[in-house]
Image (cartoon, rainbow, N blue to C red):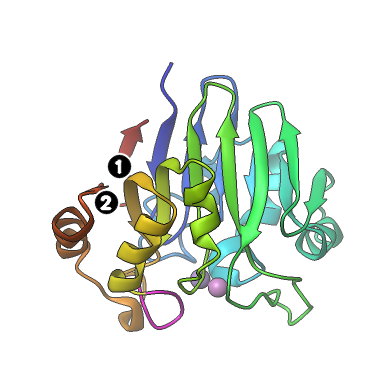
Amino acid sequence: MPIRLHYFGHSTFAIDTGAHKLIIDPFLSPNNPLAPVSAEAIVADYILLTHGHGDHCADAAAIAKRTGAMVISNFEVVSWMQQQGAENGHGMNLGGAYSFPFGRVKMTIAHHSSTMPDGSPGGNPAGFLIHFDDGVDLYIAGDTALTYDMKLIGEAGGVDLAILPIGDNFTMGPDDAITAAQFVQAKRVIPCHYNTFPPIKQDAGAFAAELRRAADIEGIVLNPGEEYAL
Ligand code: NI
Ligand code: MN
């Protein structure tokens, strides 16, 4: 069975491996103006959080409490989520990898910040490199600037799919995302973290066209609510 990705706008993706359901950075209706559904509609076994900002973890505790899903993030974010009532957590930190029942997850470097919604420290921001048990390699950059460290992912063999922010202002913009796609040697890219708010308005179709022209890499633009089979 192919891995299915479901996009909810901003940086929120559901991943269904067939056997396991993951939700990445849950930011849903009404918090996320682009999301077609609210947190109550989410079924999840694992909740992966790249960092502590509200536009990535606003709905995480509610989903964790209702479903019992395991929160996977840096140690500080997991500890904070446990204080909010999410009982099941697995703390990690940059450069560390761990084998979960769906695959192996490595926390990668992200150049950004990470404060929890109440101002508590949220550790270091991160991305995730996921090696699914069926062999698919997925890179979720998280909120980050372009960093030369991304080349290490490419040198280690690259990825089947990279989910990269293109919004600019808070993260890298479209031009740097094309360089990031080349650094990590992505076969395909799904752009995220754009059009949610006025400062991050972008033309994702133009990004995909330039990604093809400049780097010969496929860009897949998903509208909120759309699915993609990997
Ligand atoms: Ni952020
Ligand atoms: Mn963000």
Circles 1 and 2: CB distance less than 8 Å? yes
Q: Quadrant of residue 68?
A: top right
Is the CB of mark 2 within 8 Å of ligand 2?
A: no
Whether residue 171 is in magenta: the answer is yes
Circle 1 sits in a helix, a strand or a loop, which is it? Answer: loop
Total number of numbered discs in the rendering:
2
Q: Is residue 1 above or below residue 168?
A: above
Q: Is residue 49 visible?
A: no
Q: Which mark is residue 223?
A: 2
Is the CB of mark 1 within 8 Å of ligand 2?
A: no
Whether residue 112 is in magenta: the answer is no
Where the C terminus falls, by quadrant? top left
Q: Amino acid at mark 1?
A: Glu
Q: Nearer the viewer, residue 142 or 9?
A: 142
Q: Is residue 114 above or below residue 150?
A: below
Residue furthest to the front: 155
Instruction: Look at 55% across and 64% down and name the residue there.
Output: 149
Crowd rating for badge 2 (residues with CA inside 10 Å; few <14, some 14–19, many 20+): some
Q: Which residue is mark 1?
A: 226
Residue 200, percent from left and from top:
34, 77
The quadrant where ligand 1 appears is bottom right
Q: Main secondary structure of the magenta part?
A: loop
Q: Amino acid at mark 2?
A: Asn
Where the N terminus falls, by quadrant? top left
Circle 2 sits in a helix, a strand or a loop, which is it? Answer: loop
Magenta part of the protein: which range?
Answer: 167-172
Residue 184, percent from left and from top:
44, 53
